[in-house]
Image (cartoon, rainbow, N blue to C red):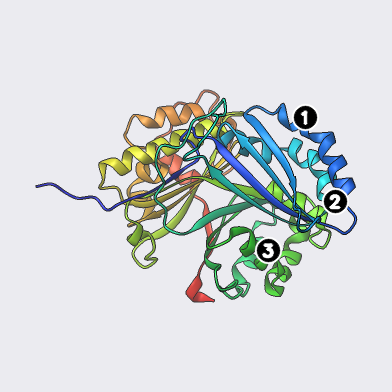
Amino acid sequence: MTTTLPERVSQSAFDGSRLRVVMLVDLHDGAQHRFLEAYERIRHHVAATPGHLSDQLCQSFENPSQWLITSEWESAPQFLDWVNSEQHIEQIRPLSACIRTTSSMRFNVLRETGEKVTGGAVQQAPRLGDDLVRHALTFTVRPGSEEAVAKLLADYDPPSAKVDDTTRLCRTTLFMHGNRVVRTVEVKGDLTKALRYVARQPEVRAVEEAINPYLEVDRDLDDPESARVFFTRAALPAVHVMATDPAAAHDPGGTGRHAVHYRAKPGMGTALARYLARQDEATAAMGGSPVVRSTIFQRDDLVVRLVDVHGPPDAAPGPVLGLHGPHEAAVLDRLLDPDARDARDGSAAPAHPGPERPADLLARSLMRLVTDRHAQDS
């Protein structure tokens, strides 16, 4: 008897296809010359970034304050490495001072006509999605303040789910691991519009102001430059989404939502995220896993895996960790930072630890759920 698996969602930054980034900006009055001068000063530095293929700067002939920057990259991970870097923050600082509003979109190249660009590949087939955009933010708080921060983040009143006629907040989930906070969001429609909407809501601003004294890195959300730098550094983009049963993943009553925290060896964050993505694909192809959805977020050497699971996570530590089989734990261990393997009670890890059992690794990597808000809750 042949079992028919549900059509699965698969979205990944690791398919090797070229990426086109489109950024529409609206400038402050009279800032056109300053903006062009700033662009001229940095464009050759950006062009030397690994993975960068080309870029164009365009000005609207209908509205001189509207400008369009497009760039092409060999692959999404190379672009994400740059856009999430301190180098990027400093490079675009002169441009940001000229900008009133901005909107950025990212697309993989699926078809092209005309002269082929050298570098990267064309995406072979359209991805299957579920009409949701996923993103995460992460930051750290001062050690010792975790309980106070968790209470503030759990007790706030969520804003209305409706952003406008085309954009809606679907789900916001907050986790903590030690002094690190991770906030994941699911949006139907325009992610940038939704994030701006949330940031303007008084109930959200009140919570953000309340946790400011506990942050390890100071911020001032009333100062546009400080807010831009904070959200750039806090961005934790989704690099892989796999859903073996999309209907089940949308049913919060049938699954539990959990997050797993991984710290990669220095410089190995992308390799770790790519490895977990391959494991998810292999598990989904086999079927039978209690994990019905996995979303991998990655920034530098931090990887967070958000999973929707049938049953308790410790009943299936391998699949929840993203391991396709029993031997993959040793490969995962080689990608993880051994300095992050301290026990929860604060005692030091063994000098030469061997690969951890999946159950032990999950026990110390599973993040604490602070709050999980669905659209119908608001």
Q: On screen, 157 above or below 134?
A: below
> The C terminus is located in which quarter?
bottom right
Q: Nearer the viewer, mark 3 or mark 2?
A: 2
Question: Pointer 2: what residue?
Answer: 97
Label 3 or label 1, whichever comes before in sequence order: 1
Residue hosting label 1 = 44
Cα–Cα span, label 3 and label 1: 31 Å
Task: Give 327 or 198, whichever is nearer the viewer.
Answer: 198
Residue drawn where x is 41% and y is 37% of the image: 124
- In the rendered structure, the answer to whether residue 31 lies left or right of residue 18 reads right
Residue 95 in percent (x, y) is at 82, 46
The image quarter containing residue 163 is bottom right
Label 2: how many Cα within 10 Å (few below 14, some 14–19, many 20+): some
| Residue beneath disc 3 | 196
Kindly report the distance in space between the C-alpha atoms of the residues bearing marks 2 and 1: 20 Å
Q: Position of residue 126 (x, y in %)?
A: 41, 45
Residue 356 falls in image quadrant:
top left
In the rendered structure, which amino acid carries the disc numbered 1?
His
Identify the residue at horizontal 61%, vertical 72% (top origin): 155
